[in-house]
Amino acid sequence: MIETIVKGFLIGLLVSAPMGPINMLVIQRTLNRGWTHGFVTGLGAMLSDLTYAVITLVGLSFVADFFDEYEQIIQIVGSIILFFFGLRVCKANPLRDWTPDKLPQETRYIRDFVSSFLLTFSNVAIVLIFMGFYARFSFNPLGDGINFFTAGLIAFIVAVFAWWFLLTSLVARLRKHFNRRGLVLLNRSVGTLLMLLGIGGIILSFFPGVA
């Protein structure tokens, strides 16, 4: 159970951390409209990520026997996906999509939430990322029972919630001294970590006894 919780937490954190359009939107709204708008925007993204996380887990449960039979190959493919995802994150320039927020300074939290959810949900490629993480971490809590499934999802939610809370709180607190170049460094750090996880997964796939 503890292993499932740790894996669920790590997956939630690694899915949320890369500085893509959603992270930039959250930061932008936090700077321009305040902490609450930024945090609500993050919650919209969290709901979308949770939806895709559940869909992917349930989908994989129907082909559990296939995954067990070809576990090594699937872990290699998943690790390769993680590596190239990390490479993309590492090379991405989060400041490229930085644009001033033109929306009026009104308290429209529902619109913030829905717009973030729809924008995140439109990226169906996230399913491949989840498959990569699940394969890399051998994460299949649904196969272990409903209690493991629930614990894994709760850990995932806690990680994503904590990420958006800490990110928006930090940006709001340091808004007068906010250095956007730090985002580039953070992005490269996260991308490098994902690439290392991918490489490590490939190596461990050939030496399963080491893991």
Image (tube, grey):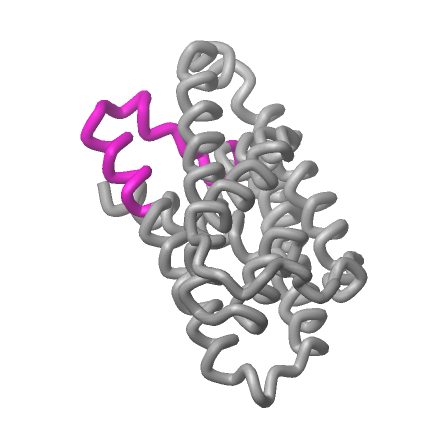
> Dominant secondary structure of the magenta stretch?
helix
Within the image, what quadrant is residue 90 found in?
bottom right
In the rendered image of this protein, does residue 107 appear above or below residue 75? below
Q: Is residue 134 visible?
A: yes
**Residue at the farthest left position:** 147
Is residue 205 visible in the rendered image? The answer is: no
- Closest to the observer, 165 or 66: 165
Q: Is residue 165 left or right of residue 29?
A: left
* Residue 32 coordinates in the image, percent (x, y): 58, 71
Q: Is residue 186 above or below residue 40?
A: below
Q: In the image, residue 69 lies at what x, y percent?
A: 50, 14
Left or right, residue 20 beside residue 132: right
Question: Residue 151 magenta-drawn?
Answer: yes
Residue 165 percent coordinates (x, y): 39, 64
Residue at the spot 67% in from the left edge and 57% down from the top edge? 191
Residue 30, percent across and down?
A: 52, 68
What quarter of the picture does the N terminus occupy? top left
Q: Residue at x 37, y 55 (%)?
A: 161
Find the magenta span and give its range: 135-155
| Foreground of the two, 107 or 129 | 107
The residue nearer to you, when weighing 7 against 172, is: 172
- Residue under the image location 45 percent in, 33 percent down: 53
- Which residue is painted at 50% across and 17% down in the image? 67
Q: Is residue 79 above or below residue 30?
A: above
Q: Is residue 191 left or right of residue 156?
A: right
- Magenta span contains residue 104: no
